[in-house]
Amino acid sequence: MTPDTRFVSCLGAKGFHRMAWHVWPGPAGRPPLVCVHGLTRNGRDFDMLAAALSRSRTVICPDIVGRGDSDRLRDPAEYGYPRYMADTATLIARLGAERVDWVGTSMGGFLGMLLAALPGQPIRRLVLNDVGPFIPQAALEQIGTYVGRDPHFPDLAAAEAYQRTVAAGFGRLTDAEWAHMARHMTRPDPAGGLRLAYDPGIAHPFRTQPVKDVDIWPVYDRIRVPTLVLRGAESGLLLAETAAQMTERGPKAELRTIPACAHAPALMAADQIALVAEFLDRD
């Protein structure tokens, strides 16, 4: 199965840009599920999860602007959460849904927290995949070592080798899953070979602002929707103590730890998909 890719026009500071969203149609009756990827990734990371969950609901997997099939922004200074929040609000309005469920990995989960804390927000159930309201400086420094790179790959085999390195924290994936990742995280280079499917300009915030701990506990404390936190057992981004506090503050999240993963669980394995499905299928 493959999704249907559509586009929505979003208004930014320098004009309109198109955001791609990959649709896995499912039966009516449940709110659509919006799955939002990590910083350098795109919506095709969720293919396995979306294919499974679309048996009971429609699943929407956007490529946040600057990634995948979406446009690149004219001004890289606009890359950041205010832009991503506005674009996803435009997408939800396009869906015509009063309520949505949300699965967010890393950046996508951080975005979900920001939205879910707002008055009148549309999120019914929230799944945070290896991210929380506190992110240590060391984790951000690690991300800064690769975000914005623009490597060239002679072929898919080289692209897959790169993914196996930078995404090692995703866990024990099959050869087919690594190959899938290599195909969808790259695009043909007009000069030959392949490059990553993102705008290196998304690294602008890392290049222009000091890297330090991120703390949005006051935002998290305002969330009032049922929340599930998935933590990679070896994660350096979602610390064990942060995850534990998330079960006691704000929405008092449920916590599940994924063994043999760091940052972040890929949500491709059947047992990981089952955790998400069980949580979303309540009510």
Image (spheres, rainbow, N blue to C red):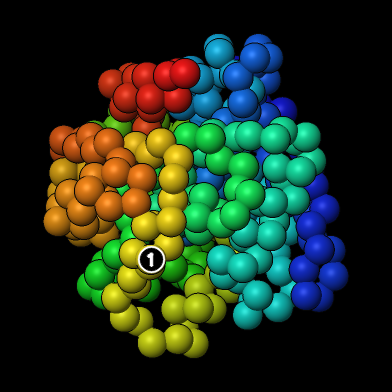
Residue at x-position 62% and y-position 28%: 32
Residue at x-position 43% and y-position 62%: 219
**Residue 168's x, y, as percent?**
27, 48
Question: Could you say which quadrant of the image residue 58 lies in?
Answer: top right
Give the total of numbered labels.
1
**Residue 220's x, y, as percent?**
39, 57
Q: Nearer the viewer, residue 247 or 112?
A: 247
For the N terminus, the image quarter is: top right
**Residue 151's x, y, as percent?**
47, 65
Q: Is residue 156 above or below residue 213?
A: above
Q: Amino acid at mark 1?
A: Pro
Residue at x-position 53% and y-position 45%: 36
Horizontal relation, residue 39 to residue 6: left or right: left
Mark 1: secondary structure: helix
Residue bearing mark 1: 218
Residue 52 visible in this rendered orientation of the protein = yes
Q: Is residue 127 above or below residue 117?
A: above
Q: Is residue 201 above or below residue 125?
A: below
> Dot 1, crowdedness within 10 Å: few (<14), some or many (≥20)?
few
Residue at x-position 26% and y-position 59%: 237
Horizontal relation, residue 128 to residue 4: left or right: left
Q: Is residue 2 above or below residue 96?
A: above
Horizontal relation, residue 18 to residue 171: left or right: right
**Residue 277's x, y, as percent?**
41, 21
Residue 266 visible in this rendered orientation of the protein = no
